[in-house]
Image: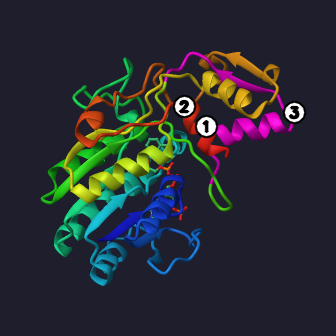
Amino acid sequence: MKVLVTGANGFTGQHLVKTLVGKGFEVIATSRNESKLPSYSNLNYYNIDLTDVRNVENLFDSTRPDAVIHTAAMSKPDECAANPELCTANNIQATQYLLSAATKAGTNHFVYLSTDFIFGEGGPHDEEDVPAPLNFYGASKLEAEALVNAASLNTTIVRPVFMYGPVWENLRPSFIQWVAGKLQNGEPIKVVTDQARTPTYIGDLCWGIRKIINEQVPGTFHLAGKDIVSPYDMAVAVAKHLNLPLDLIEPVTASTFPEPVKRAQRSGLKIDKAVSILGYAPHSFAEALQKCFE
Ligand SMILES: NC(=O)c1ccc[n+]([C@@H]2O[C@H](COP(=O)([O-])OP(=O)(O)OC[C@H]3O[C@@H](n4cnc5c(N)ncnc54)[C@H](OP(=O)(O)O)[C@@H]3O)[C@@H](O)[C@H]2O)c1
């Protein structure tokens, strides 16, 4: 199967490309800038800006993928709030260009990476809960979901939460590496106790997406972790796992950091549907930490 991965330089994109290449897929990877990926015989990389429709059409004309995994996005809520036009172009228009080009090229399956930010308070949410985004980023991802649902090809929406995983050179760190780095340098950190999340271990997300494209499973799936934790719980677990000083972690409430955009206090996603339909069996946070730092 020939799979096109957008956002291939990003955290999710790099992990997905590595997984799919390792499993023998023919991978077409694309991102805006020069490739940050190693070279493999079954990987071809194209750096294009997806907000230019001609780039997108040319990419599909020349590569003709069987499946698309669309991870590219303006993924930082604060940046989206500061530049809503750019967010609209990157998160909504680019998704429409990809859907149209995929339909025209006869692509079999389109997988879209969405987010728990399409919901408001009251998590963890299941797939049927009513969306109520609290910020522009969440609203842009919800609008892109509507485009995906309206498209006339086989589509799947995958919603992860606050992703973490191992990193390597040229891959941006996730929250757990930020915590580890600060504590290793002896720097004190303030971490929020009053936000609940169900963070997704990237290895579980890659497993779920591979299952979805192999079996062409349509619909919407929450691919999150099974533990409900706060960022403070996560930081303490990292410190304990790496034997780093716990007293450098100061528990604070979210009000300590006045943020430009609103975020849910209690977010997170329920995974029962993915468990029953896909056989999704995510690692616990403690098990995943072991894998991230081994
Ligand atoms: N990270 C999380 O915790 C999280 C949680 C829930 C959902 N999500 C969703 O999951 C997806 C992946 O997130 P991530 O954190 O892995 O993202 P990321 O690390 O920020 O990477 C996003 C990638 O998208 C590419 N990109 C952005 N705009 C582009 C454009 N106009 N044309 C071409 N490429 C473009 C960028 O490429 P260059 O680097 O080459 O510029 C970047 O590498 C996103 O859709 C996000 O909304 C993320």
Q: Can residue 30 be seen by looking at this rendering? A: yes
Q: Quadrant of residue 122?
A: top left
Name the residue type under label 3: Gly
Quarter occupied by the N terminus:
bottom left
Q: Which mark is residue 289?
A: 1
CB atoms of marks 2 and 1 within 8 Å: yes
Furthest residue in direction right, as rendered: 186
Region in magenta:
172-196
Q: Would residue 289 be found to the left or right of residue 41 on screen? A: right
Q: Please state the horizontal and vertical placement of residue 89, each as a whole percent of the image.
A: 38, 57
Query: Disc 3 or 2, which lies upstream in sequence?
Result: 3
Q: Which residue lies under the disc numbered 3?
A: 186
Q: Would residue 34 be found to the left or right of residue 54 on screen? A: right
Q: Which mark is residue 285?
A: 2
Q: SS of the residue at dot 2?
A: helix
Q: Please state the horizontal and vertical placement of residue 227, each as a whole percent of the image.
A: 47, 25
Q: Nearer the viewer, mark 3 or mark 2?
A: 2
Which residue is pictured at 84% across the width and 32% down the height? 187
Residue 278 position (above or below residue 26): above
Name the residue type under label 2: Phe
CB atoms of marks 3 and 1 within 8 Å: no
Q: SS of the residue at dot 3?
A: loop
Q: Please state the horizontal and vertical placement of residue 56, each as a whole percent of the image.
A: 33, 72
Query: Disc 3 or 1, which lies upstream in sequence?
Result: 3
Which residue is pictured at 21% across the width and 66% down the height? 100
